[in-house]
Image (cartoon, rainbow, N blue to C red):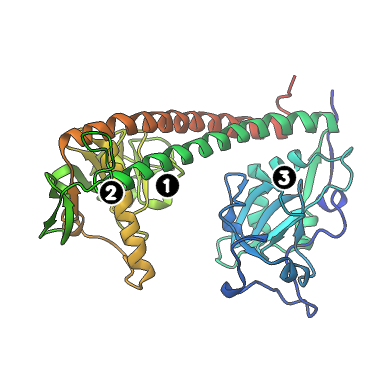
Amino acid sequence: MNKWRKTTIGQLVVDNVIEAPMDGNHGEIHPKGSDFVESGIPFIMASDIENSVIDLKGCKFITKCQADNLRKGFSVEGDVLLTHKATMGRTAIVPKLDTDYVMLTPQTTYYRVKNKKVLNNKFLKYFFDCKPFQETLKLWAGAGSTRAYLGITGQLNLAIRLPGIGVQEKIGAVLAALDAKIDLNNRINVELEAMAKTLYDYWFVQFDFPDEIGKPYKSSGGKMVYNDILKREIPEGWGDKQLCQIANITMGQSPAGSSFNELGEGMIFFQGSTDFGWQFPSIRQYTTEPARMAKRGDVLLSVRAPVGDMNITHVDCCIGRGLAALNSKDGFDGFLFYVLKYFKQIFARRNSEGTTFGSITKDDLYSLIVAYPTVGLLKEYDKIVSRYNDMVFKRSMENLYLTRLRDWLLPMLMNGQVSVA
């Protein structure tokens, strides 16, 4: 039987593991907004680490010169990252890089394995993901406060229980394979959604849908007419409609707080965008007194800050007042989804101009105006986009299953209840 031994994390990682860039006076350095550049050395913040993945494309960048002036915070391929301040407990492994290193925000610690014959970095990452470690991390840090924090000394003193390196490698490989498949599905879904959105913009925003001979309508001289309601030109034969004319809209209403539970009693309940995941909301609460309902496949739209965030519900559910549920009256759900995506861009633009949308009322939502195309064009768009949406939905459902499998296996593998053959 494989023996497990107990030690501390500090015994297993290199001595110069540090938690943040610091200046010579031991004060934290965080680049200012004006310091960031379009490309260079990735500067990883806690928000760039999500679902065990580092967003190296969407993160901010600093110049190599600026990075060289920071004494600490250099992290390289294979390091295990852990967020330990405010947003606590997110983990990832630094992937293969185009640069020699990445820089870290003060909210993040890197762990570099001292001896790969003793500790496997994937095993360490999944040890960090385990519920007992996450609870210990928050307990030590005094979580519950927005200033929750666990310094490097406390982190290195945390206990860890280790099997032999061969067992560690097998455990790490199994869990990493599940995460890799989840990440691959997410990346494919991002591409599919981008394709559908690009087509929507091309056809319904730029009005370059295929004309009768397959040429882009507006660019090829298609007739445009001025619409008094929209206050702009739209293709001849198009009209304008309010959102409530093309969509069934259900505004959420929160049940009594006393009806909430996490035991699975009653109906699944989603309160607002805090329940949102990448594609589907996360099931956290139930209510025994459901009020407003949404059906499987409905678009869930956040109507309170932030206005415009979206998910698809994969289950029948009850929705709270932070959400609205929408589905197409005419069966063109693909078109409706990207109409709402388009409206989100408008909300975001107005937010950037200083007009903050703390919420959107029922009347405001119902009265949003959209340029409405011909039925033939809608059918053609839906024929294309429904294939994309089906693929996204299937991969998202697969990810739900893979995530449940990973989360079920994780504690049993990490405490030796089950082994990898």
Q: Position of residue 287 (x, y in %)?
A: 33, 42
Q: Look at mark 3 in the image and give the residue it sits on.
A: 96
Q: Is residue 180 visible?
A: yes
- Tell me the CA gap for discs 2 and 1: 39 Å
Dot 1 or dot 3, earlier in sequence: 3
Q: Residue at x 47, y 37 (%)?
A: 189
For label 2, the crowd category at 10 Å Cα-Cα, with few meaning under 14, some 14 to 19 and many 20 or more, is few
The disc at residue 219 is 2
Dot 2 or dot 1, earlier in sequence: 2
Residue at disc 1, secondary structure: loop
Tell me the mark number nearer the camera, choosing from 2 and 3.
2
Residue at disc 2, secondary structure: loop
Circle 3: residue type:
Lys
Residue at disc 3, secondary structure: loop
- Tell me the CA gap for discs 2 and 3: 43 Å
Give 189 or 256, whichever is nearer the viewer.
Answer: 189
The disc at residue 276 is 1
Give 99 or 415, whichever is nearer the viewer.
Answer: 99
For this view, does 113 lie left or right of residue 80? right
